[in-house]
Amino acid sequence: MNLNLIQSKLSEMNTPKGGSQKANEKALSFWKPTIGKALVRFVPSNRNPENPFTELYFHYGIGKRTIISPTNFGEKDPIIEFSKELRKTKEPENWKMAKKLEPKMRVFAPVIVRGEEEKGVRLWEFGKEIYQALLSLAADEDVGDFTDIMEGRDMKVETVGPDSTGTAYNKSTILPAMKTTQLSSNNTEVEKWLANQPDPTSFSKRYTFEEIKQFLVEFLNPEEEAPKTETAGDDFLALPKTQAEPTPAPAPVANKAFALKPKETIAEDEFEDLFK
């Protein structure tokens, strides 16, 4: 029996594959506050040393997937382009839909969790409320640059659960430590933390422009089966026309938000210009 081969096979079987491996990697790369108290230290970002916060925009609720917006990478986003066209109409329902389609901001920052330094730098993902609180602390002359590796500040994070918030979600608040401290007294550790940080964009699948257009078509027309062999053309953005019927009453449409009068329908060539 080749024991080296056996050991290699055992290691292979114990290593998660596919989606499980990706999920495991993400779990190791992110920190999420749990109910109680924690002490964290924000670390200067190796992606942008001048700003530890990375703002990323995502579409939620378009089908069963989360879509990272191509605008994060300097590319056009068909959902945003369609939302702009909705806002050019006079229909209140279209404005509501436009707002729903707009991407939502999430913020990512590299942190060291005190007491768990051996886990290295992880990403903390949060929303607008925590983000504003952190920006306000940085702008406060009594706090300043809390990421400074020599004279920065740890942050006290206290999290309460649904019993306290009255919602289905936890809520975290942040307070800076009174004293300034070093990130670490171990220079080698500091160098490792500054060099080895997860990339927040690497955990989301990047879809192509055409794929996102197709997702939007399926979202807007849930009663119709999306074509399997053809991709959505540039005219997919055109707002549906009111359907003509023998009787004066208009025919029902799948999404009433897009039942516009013919004069308000946007011409196909106008949509094609969006992608030139």
Image: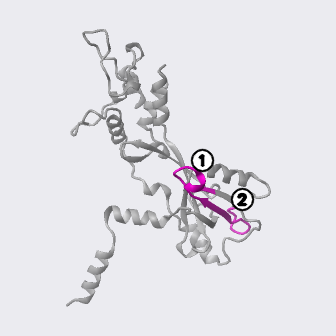
Q: Position of residue 146 (x, y in %)?
A: 70, 61
- Which quarter of the picture shows residue 15? bottom left
- For label 2, the SS is loop
- Which quarter of the picture shows residue 77? top left
Given residues 99 and 51, the one toward you in this image is: 99
- For label 1, the SS is helix
Disc 1 residue type (three-letter):
Lys
For the residues labelled 2 and 1, the Cα–Cα distance comes to 20 Å
Q: Position of residue 149 (x, y in %)?
A: 68, 67
Camera-near label (2 vs 1) is 1
The residue drawn where x is 38% and y is 25% is: 256
Task: Please name the residue that numbered disc 1 is placed on.
Answer: 128
User: In the rendered structure, which disc, 2 or 1, sits on the residue that comes first in sequence?
Assistant: 1
Which label was assigned to residue 189? none
- Contact check, label 2 and label 1, Cβ < 8 Å: no
State which quarter of the image contains the C terminus: top left
The residue drawn where x is 47% and y is 67% is: 28
Question: Which contiguous range is marked in magenta?
Answer: 146-172
Given residues 257 and 131, the one toward you in this image is: 257
Question: Tag 2: Cα neighbours inside 10 Å, few (<14), some, or many (≥20)?
Answer: some
Q: Is residue 157 magenta?
A: yes
* Residue 241 higher or lower than 135, as above or below: above
Disc 2 residue type (three-letter):
Asp
Q: Can see residue 202?
A: yes
* Residue 16 higher or lower than 269, as above or below: below
Task: Please name the residue that numbered disc 2 is placed on.
Answer: 145
Question: Tag 1: Cα neighbours inside 10 Å, few (<14), some, or many (≥20)?
Answer: few
* Residue 100 higher or lower than 207, as above or below: above
